[in-house]
Image (spheres, helix red, strand yellow):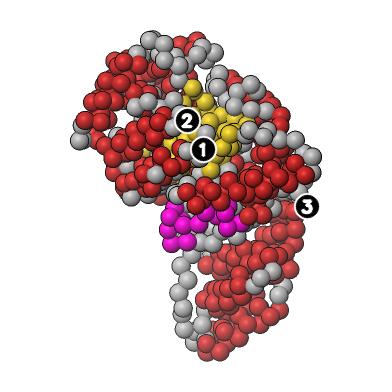
Amino acid sequence: MSGQLKGEKVFRGIAVSDGVCRGKVVVMHRSRRVITKRHLADDSVVPETKRFEHALVRTRQQITEVQRRVADTMSSNEADIFDAHLLMLEDRVLIEEVIKIIREQKTNADYAFHTAADRYIAVLEAVEDEYLRERAADLRDLTGRVLDNLLEVKDQFDLRHLTEPCILVAHDLSPSMTAQLDKKLVLGFATDIGSKTSHTAILAQSLDIPAVVGTKNISEELETGDYVLLDGYNGTVIVNPTDQTMFEYGQLAKIKASLDEKLREVQHQPAVTLDGKIVHLSANIEEQGDVEAVLAHGAEGVGLFRTEYLFLNREQPPTEEDQFQVYRAVATALQPHSVIIRTLDLGGDKFASNLDLAQEMNPFLGWRAIRFCLAQPELFRAQLRAILRASAGGNVKMMYPMISGLDELNQANTLVEQCKAELRAEKIPFAENLEVGAMIEIPSAVLIADALAARVKFFSIGSNDLIQYTLAIDRGNERVTHLYQPTHPAVLRLIKMTVDAAHAKGIWAGVCGQIAGDPVLAPLLIGLGVDELSCAPGVIDEVKYMIRRLKLAEAKALAEFALGCESPTEIAARCMEFARQTAPSLFENKAA
Ligand code: PEP
Ligand code: MG
């Protein structure tokens, strides 16, 4: 298909994952379902009923087709979903009710079906029986398919349809969809919305896929088949790049290759400043497969294992045994380095369809992370037991996300003690002295950091959330991304307070949010006294390169300046100036 845009055109967005790629675009169209009630003339009632029946037949064909196409790769659990959908499609009670609404209210089929199915879904969601509640999700899915057929909305995009390498363009990509991207087929992606610290962006970095988000309208302007060059360093997508542009990128690729050479040299060197300060530099991972990259980049173990990704894109939550196998494999592979396993942080922008996470008005302020886990003790205990069991065979530590007060910490610790008692009774080995830490990502936790520090072995500052909750800026919303300022004096003071509270109690404090992986901000964090930096494996080399070129004394001076400065932009500019002077090679492929 040829594109609608002629000549070169540049889309600007937010650079979230480094790298340059070029290729043909596949646009994942957003389905817009607008259901309005229309009144039917008497003689339209019968044709409208037929239209409904036809949509059911069409839906049946589509489901059977998908089922047939993926039969080889599907587990039996996945196959069951399609069977359940087909059965629901034949539910006479639902069908009769829709036809009754069409006839009696003389209204359009999509409105009638939407009304009847919604009623059904509400009933299923309200029942105690877990099995029936899960069927509500199936019915919602199925309702979408039938409505798409009635409204003639294009199929929801299925990543399994990709057959050759491309650059994905979408209005948005959810973290669970991003987690499914196949690097061999998706060279890069660009979205209309999103921001630097959304979990979609974090995953792109982890997968090492160049990405640009927050372009506002790229998914509407581009068509499948358009040719683009995507620059994940500078946040641009260039459609129909001219020869001159291609030449310039060729030059940049050469500069990048020489930088890569320099970065490779530090891969297995220690992260130590010129004046001898050792910084613990570890990696953030999302799945077992990331271990390879952790080892390749010479990270000192894992500072953040986001375990919630084990729960996404599967029919049933993983069992204790499933989790144990993964945690043990990661811990064994990275010995003697430590692996900090973060307990489940679902909610916010990460939803597992296999768990009962209701839609909320403010998910980032809602039923998320430790709050969700404490309300689901059985689910939580399975994870705690799995982590404890894995600690027998590796250097495992554990931390809780989103701690806002002492009660949560105490409740979680009580559950850990119960799990330990069970394991002792069952004669299952675990490390009695497993270290437990708290993530500091809510301002209230900073303000009571002295009390928390007395009860844990370490702090890990989740700056992505700490910034969001301090400044009241949604971390995933590109409209307010300019206000999401890591160098805001309030944020820097909170980081300093956390570090000081930790050190006063003799424990260490690290940072595992995105700022830890930014070579421009790493010197500032080190100057503020942070002991550990944990970041995506792909950016470890750059951070280490920077560390090995700076002096602790200079980093402290930078932090002192920042703590005395009132302007976030001035602090950011000073950090940039310092970074460019200290390690100019890191910036040669980035715009000034
Ligand atoms: C953070 O909030 O900085 C963090 C590391 O956790 P996540 O990004 O997974 O919320
Ligand atoms: Mg967080």
Location of the C terminus by quadrant is: top left
* Left or right of residue 456, residue 547 in this image: left
Q: Residue at x 60, y 80 (%)?
A: 98
The reply to whether the residue tagged 1 has its Cβ within 8 angstroms of ligand 1 is no
- Where is residue 585 drawn, in percent x and y? 37, 14
* Left or right of residue 427, residue 132 in this image: left
Q: Earlier in the sequence, mark 2 or mark 3?
A: 3
Classify mark 2: helix, strand or loop.
loop
- Location of residue 157 with respect to 467 vertically, above or below: below
Give how far apart the Cα atoms at labels 1 and 3 are: 43 Å
Q: Which mark is residue 76?
A: 3
- Where is residue 99 drawn, in percent x and y? 62, 82
- Location of residue 590 with respect to 486 vertically, above or below: above
Q: Nearer the viewer, residue 71 or 357?
A: 357
Label 2 sits on residue? 507
Q: Residue at x 23, y 26 (%)?
A: 561
* Left or right of residue 560, residue 73 in this image: right
Label 1 sits on residue? 456
- Report the amino acid beneath label 2: Ile
Decide: few, some or many residues near mark 2? Use Cα within 10 Å; few <14, some 14-19, many ≥20: some
Decide: few, some or many residues near mark 3? Use Cα within 10 Å; few <14, some 14-19, many ≥20: few
**Which range is magenta?**
360-376
- Where is residue 426 drawn, in percent x and y? 79, 44
Classify mark 3: helix, strand or loop.
helix
Q: Are marks 2 and 3 in contact (CB under 8 Å)?
A: no
Q: Are marks 1 and 2 in contact (CB under 8 Å)?
A: yes
Q: In terms of image quadrants, where is residue 570?
A: top left
Q: Earlier in the sequence, mark 1 or mark 2?
A: 1
Q: Residue at x 63, y 45 (%)?
A: 416
In this rendering, the label closer to the viewer, 1 or 3:
1
Residue 254 in view (yes/no): no
- Report the amino acid beneath label 3: Ser
